Amino acid sequence: HRVVDGHVVRPSGVARFDQRYFDHWYRDEGFGSTTRLDRKVDYAIAAAEYLLDRPVARVLDVGCGEGWWQPALRSRRHDASYLGIDPSQYAIERYGKERNLRLGRLADLAALLDGEGTFDLVVCVDVFGYVGDAEAREGLATIARYLEGVALLEIYVAGDDIVGDLDDYRWRRPETFEQWFDA
């Protein structure tokens, strides 16, 4: 990888969200460590089950990548259903059937979820920085329509000190998200 203006940039020639992308960021750089994933999954399930006062039964993962939440969820809640949505053709071709992943972007969410019912837990980790304002607002509204529990939305804002794929990252002020959440 290379560093430009203090930001880590994906390797030259790596198409967004292909196998080399996942190999680089999730395997080589360590963003896909099982310890890190386990903490996030345990936290999300505990928060949802505390507020719902029952076990989580349905989970939606928007921007799921290779769908690693599915086996982690399965090991904790055997009967829970999982649906992952991601724009990566590679991830869907490789893991789609095995992990119940569908090809789509945040903007496609309403159409992809039509007839699906609601979810106890919606996970949307590190997605909003990679989409435009209209898609982000539409995605949040769709998540709200299909949520009957807890949403884990991992969002970084201008001024946050993060390391990762910052190519084309859209930095927004915290106030922007506050307005979108209010809407």
Image (spheres, rainbow, N blue to C red):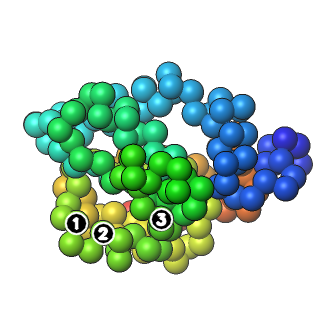
Q: Position of residue 62 (x, y in %)?
A: 43, 56
Circle 2 Cα neighbour tier, 10 Å, few/some/many (<14 / 14–19 / ≥20): some
**Secondary structure state at the residue bearing disc 2:** helix
Q: Secondary structure at mark 1?
A: loop
Which-is-in-front pick, marks 1 and 3?
3
Which secondary structure, mark 3? Answer: strand
Q: In the displayed structure, does residue 9 sit left or right of residue 99?
A: right
x and y, in percent, of residue 174 in the image: 54, 56
Mark 1 and 3 residues: CB-CB less than 8 Å, in contact? no
Tell me: 94 left or right of 138: right
Q: Nearer the viewer, mark 2 or mark 3?
A: 3
Determine contact: label 1, label 2, CB under 8 Å.
Answer: yes
Left or right, residue 158 beside residue 154:
right
Q: Quadrant of the N terminus?
A: top right
- Labels 1 and 3: the sequence-earlier one: 3
Q: Amino acid at mark 3?
A: Leu
Please name the residue that numbered disc 3 is placed on: 103
Based on the displayed image, in which of its 4 quarters is residue 69 positioned? top left
Q: Residue at x 33, y 63 (%)?
A: 143
Residue positioned 10% across, 37% down in the render: 54
C-alpha span from label 2 to label 3: 12 Å
Spatial separation of the CA atoms under disc 1 and disc 3: 16 Å
Q: Which mark is residue 113?
A: 2
**Could you tell me residue 110's position as x and y percent?**
35, 74
- Examine the rendered structure and indicate whether residue 144 appears above or below residue 74: below
Residue ID at (14%, 42%) = 52
Amino acid identity at mark 1:
Glu
Of residue 73 and residue 151, the one placed in the foreground of this image is 73
The residue wearing badge 1 is: 116
Mark yes or no: residue 173 visible. Answer: no
Q: How packed is label 3: few (under 14 Cα within 10 Å), some, or many (20 or more)?
A: some
